[in-house]
């Protein structure tokens, strides 16, 4: 994998399970998804993804996450995953409120 790519990972299936430990399962699901789709041996997850997953609550992770994958070595065996779209808590509903009012 010579260049960087962006993947949108669906995490909504985590809501089919029990409420506890959803955020750690989300991180595990992200790692498994990237290993499957990039064939990398090692995935380094950046703290921005971790903070985004845990931002809402331990048992309510976001339904989707956009991840930018950057190769660390030339062969593509080690990859770093960074949050692709930074979302702040106030930026989601503010544009809709301005349009209506």
Image: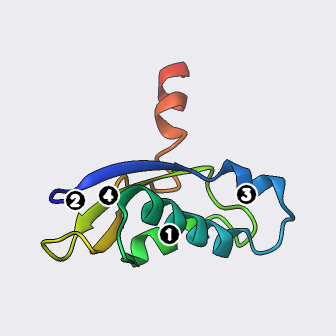
Q: Residue at x 31, y 72 (%)?
A: 80
Q: Which residue is mark 2?
A: 1
Please determine whether, in this image, residue 93 is positioned above or below residue 79: above
Q: Is residue 52 visible?
A: no
The answer to whether the residue labelled 4 contacts the one labelled 1, judged by CB atoms less than 8 Å apart, is: no
Instruction: Identify the mark nearer the N-term, 3 or 4.
Output: 3
**Residue 2 relative to residue 7: left or right:** left
Q: Which residue is mark 1?
A: 31
Q: Which residue is mark 3?
A: 14
Q: CA distance from mark 3 to mark 4?
A: 21 Å
Please determine whether, in this image, residue 25 is positioned above or below residue 92: below
Instruction: Identify the mark nearer the N-term, 2 or 4.
Output: 2
Q: Which residue is mark 4?
A: 68
The answer to whether the residue labelled 1 contacts the one labelled 3, judged by CB atoms less than 8 Å apart, is: no
The answer to whether the residue labelled 2 contacts the one labelled 4, judged by CB atoms less than 8 Å apart, is: no
Q: Position of residue 29 (x, y in %)?
A: 59, 65
Q: Secondary structure at mark 3?
A: helix
User: In the rendered view of the protein, which quadrant contains the N terminus?
Assistant: bottom left
**Residue 53 relative to residue 80: left or right:** right
Q: Secondary structure at mark 2?
A: loop
The label nearer to you, 1 versus 3, is: 1
Q: Position of residue 16 (x, y in %)?
A: 82, 53
Q: Residue at x 16, y 77 (%)?
A: 73
């Amino acid at each position: 994998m010579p260049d960087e790519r962006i993947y949108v990972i669906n995490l909504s299936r985590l809501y089919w399970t029990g409420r506890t430990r959803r955020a750690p399962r989300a991180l595990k699901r992200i790692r498994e998804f990237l290993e499957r789709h990039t064939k990398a041996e090692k995935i380094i997850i950046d703290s921005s993804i971790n903070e985004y997953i845990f931002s809402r609550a331990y048992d309510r992770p976001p339904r989707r996450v956009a991840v930018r994958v950057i190769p660390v070595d030339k062969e593509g065996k080690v990859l770093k995953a960074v949050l692709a779209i930074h979302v702040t808590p106030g930026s989601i509903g503010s544009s809709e409120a301005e349009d209506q009012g």
